[in-house]
Structures are given as structure tokens and as C-alpha cells.
Image: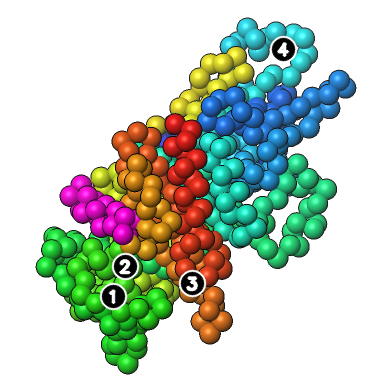
Amino acid sequence: MAVGVSLFLGLIGYMVYFQVFKSEELLNRPENKRQDKVEAQVIRGSILASDGNTVLAETQVDGEGIEKRVYPFGSLFAHTVGYQVYGGSGLESTQNNTLIRSHANLVTQMEKELQEEKKNGDDIITTFDPSLQQAASDALGENRGAVVVMESSTGKVLADFSSPSFDPNAVEQNWELLTQDDNGVFLNRGLQGLYPPGSTFKMVTALAYLRQYGTFDGFHYDCYGEYENSGFTIHCAGHQAHGSESFEDAMANSCNCAFAYMATNLIDKDNLRKAAEDLGFNRDFDLNLPYTVSEFTMDANTANQLTMQTAIGQGDTLATPMQICMIAQAIANDGKMLTPYFVDYVRASDGTEVSKTDPVAIGDVMTMQQANMLKQIMKSVVSRGTASPYLGDLSNYDIAGKTGTAEYGDIANDTAHSWFVGFSNTGSRDIVVCVLVEGGGNGVAPAANVARSIFTTHFGNN
């Protein structure tokens, strides 16, 4: 008898668990046939921009009742909004259950049923700003790459553009051609692309140093354009000798030699590993869209040759643009890293707010004091350092940032990605911008110029 009761209670608990905690997840799975039954009774909701009016995806119904999913911006939001056919992608896939459910008032729903009409599904209001998305697309041009823009204080993703892209309106008819394309058109490079981070990683190395010594004061290095250790030589860009440098000078100049020196002589290797992992490397984040984990493999036993490369963002380290953006966001936000999010709120067809996304903190990845010290040396990068020729005149935005040139493939071919990550400090709707230009060359201009377009567009609209 007792065994039977236990089994019965266990079955009830199992059913409650799936109904209460797992129902959304199960309904969202493409293989769940219940979706088809639900969708047959509902006109799929729209996906809208952050203003709550601009349509990014909608279902149009013609006079014969034939439905067609339409994407007014074409390829501009293809990777984030996604497409509906062949299992779907982007928010069309991850938010499928929301789009095919109706939370309109019961009177409205009953009227629809009595008239044998489909209900209207809930609408998703995203965090996306079309003007920033367009600015990212225009500035990248024909280049491959990614642009991620976040609101510093909330984690809202204002733009996530990836190039090359595709037209979600034509996915079904072009499916075979698109799936055979070797340019990675379906890859959301901002969230899923892994790249050597280059000198943007010096934010991590600087934090490891700061944690160990508590201050940048007292650091000194004489740069002669190259640094040798254990039979391996690191060069500064163009073999430039930067001379006598403070830590702030080394950051502003993006001095490879200084950072390689501190990683092999001043920073405990375990401290560098811990700083990287605290800032998000080797961690999976639960985002609304597919995300690739950034990789960091160095530890206390790593040889000096690889340690030197790791400290300047080369070696085996790989990062997504989103990961680099999140690190800069934590610095901008007094050390608190926030979860990036793409859905602001859900609204029923009658205008009722169904749910709203609140900012969620991943944690305090550094102290406020450490964040302020990092912010200060990153301002020097823009005011007098490697980013100064491209962003230095935007003093009204008080930008702090870090440039990066990341070598990849056969170094003999002089192949490199161009990076920039930075944030504004105006005190009003400040943003973090991360730009990656694939194969942008040995220089920061391609990425920094894209970032300039984003900053000027954002503050021109505010």
C-alpha cells in the first residue's frame, strides 16, 4: 500500500513539474506536434522594435485567409529576428511559444471563437533600435564581421548585426542555395563567432594585474619594440618602440611587449586564468538566442611562450564579440556584469502588457574601484592612444575603449581581424559598442570607424 501511494505521489509530482516548470520549454521544441495544433488556432504575433511600433516580423493575411510571414527590413535583422520555416531560427524559434499564444482579454477571445476566427497571438517588443542596426550595416559595408551594441546599465541589446546576411523573406525558396553557401550566412557572428580577441583581451590582463597589486601606480616598463622570453619574441605593432611607459601609457599604446612582460614576470598565471573565467570565458550564458562559449585554456603550467601570446589576446584564446562587449559593459557599469537580453516585453493583441524583462545581474566581476581604474586607463586609449585618430574628437561622449588587431591563420600572409570595444560616459542612456571586422587588416581603423558611426548615430537620436 505504501509503495503504491509513493508511486502515485511521485507520478503526480512528475506531472506537476512538467506542467509548471517545463511546459514552456517543451512547447517550444520544434518536434512537439502540439505547436501545430496551437498555431492552427492563432495568427502568429508580431516581432517589433523597441519603440513598440516598428514591425520587424508580422503575419499578413490576404482576402482568402492565406497567411504569409513578412520581414519588412529584409536582411537587416535576419540573425536576431530569424525566420519561421524549416524549424525556424532567431527569436522566431526561441520565442515561438509566446508568438502563438494569446493573452487578449477573454471577451475578445470568445468573440473570435464565436465568429470562427483565429485569435491574435501575443506580440514581442524587442530591445532593438533600427537606426543603430542600420548604422552598423552601413558602416560594415561589404566587410564580414559583427557589431553588438548594449545599454550599459541594463544589458539591453540595442543592435546585433552580422555580415554576411540573408533575406528571411526568401529562405524557403533559396534554402538549398543558402545551406550550401560557404560564407556562413546563417552564423550570428556577434553571438556565435569565435575569434582571437587580440588586444581587447588586455582588459582582462589589466584586471588580473590590478587584483594582484591593487593599483596601477608604480608600474614601469621600457619598450624597445620587442620582448624576448624563453626563446620567443613578442613585437609591438610595426616594431614601434614606445620607450618609458606607465601602465596607462602601455594601455593607451596597446604595447604588446609591456603586457607580455607583466604576464611572465608580474602576474600569477592562475590569477590571469581566474580573471578570464570570472569575466565570462569558459562559461555558458542563458541568452534568448544561441550563444557560443568563449574559450580560455591557460593555467599555472602553461609555458611562457603561450602565456605571452595569451596576455595580448592571441594563442589559444577565442572570444565572441558579445563576450568582449560584456566585459566592457561590466567595466562601464561599476563592475556589475549583466545578462544581455533581446526581448523587452510581451504585449497581447489588445495592448495589455503580458510580461516584462528586468535586468539580471550575472554578478560583481570586479569592485567599483577596480572598474573605475580600468575605465580611466581605457579613456586614455581614446583621448591619446590607438583609438584617438578615429574617436578622439568625440569628447562630448567621454568614450573609454580598447582597440585590437588579432592575427589568425598563416601569420606569413599578414591576416588579421580588426577590433574595437568601448563605451560612453555621458550619464544618459550610455552604450557599449563592440565591433569585429573579419580580415580588417593590421590596424584598428576599420573597427574604430564602425564604432564611431554607432556612437554618433545613437547620440544624434537622443
What residue is shown with label 4?
112
The amino acid on which the numbered mark 1 sits, given as a three-letter code, is His
The residues tagged by marks 2 and 4 sit, at their Cα atoms, a distance apart of: 65 Å
Q: Is residue 284 left or right of residue 332?
A: right
Question: Could you say where residue 426 lies in the image, as x and y percent from the top left?
Answer: 32, 38
How far apart are the alpha carbons under marks 3 and 1? 18 Å
Q: Position of residue 110 (x, y in %)?
A: 67, 9
Going from N to C along the chain, the mark reached first, 3 or 1, is 1
Q: Which mark is residue 242?
A: 1
Circle nearer the N terminus (2, 4) = 4
Look at the numbered disc 1 and give the secondary structure of its residue: loop
Sort mark 1 into few (<14), some (14-19) or many (20+) by Cα contacts within 10 Å. Answer: some
Residue under the point 33% across and 51% down: 400
Q: Secondary structure at mark 2?
A: helix
Residue assigned mark 3: 442
Q: Amino acid at mark 3?
A: Asn
Mark nearer the N terminus (3 vs 4): 4
Q: Nearer the viewer, mark 2 or mark 4?
A: 2
**Span colored in magenta:** 363-384
Q: Are marks 3 and 1 in contact (CB under 8 Å)?
A: no
Question: Image quarter for residue 425?
Answer: top left
Q: Quadrant of residue 280?
A: bottom left
Q: Which marked residue is nearer to the observer: mark 3 or mark 1?
A: 1
Q: Residue at x 45, y 44 (%)?
A: 455
Residue pointed to by mark 2: 253
One can see residue 367 in this view: no
Task: Tell me the CA gap for discs 3 and 2.
Answer: 15 Å
Whether residue 8 sits left or right of residue 130 in the image: it is left
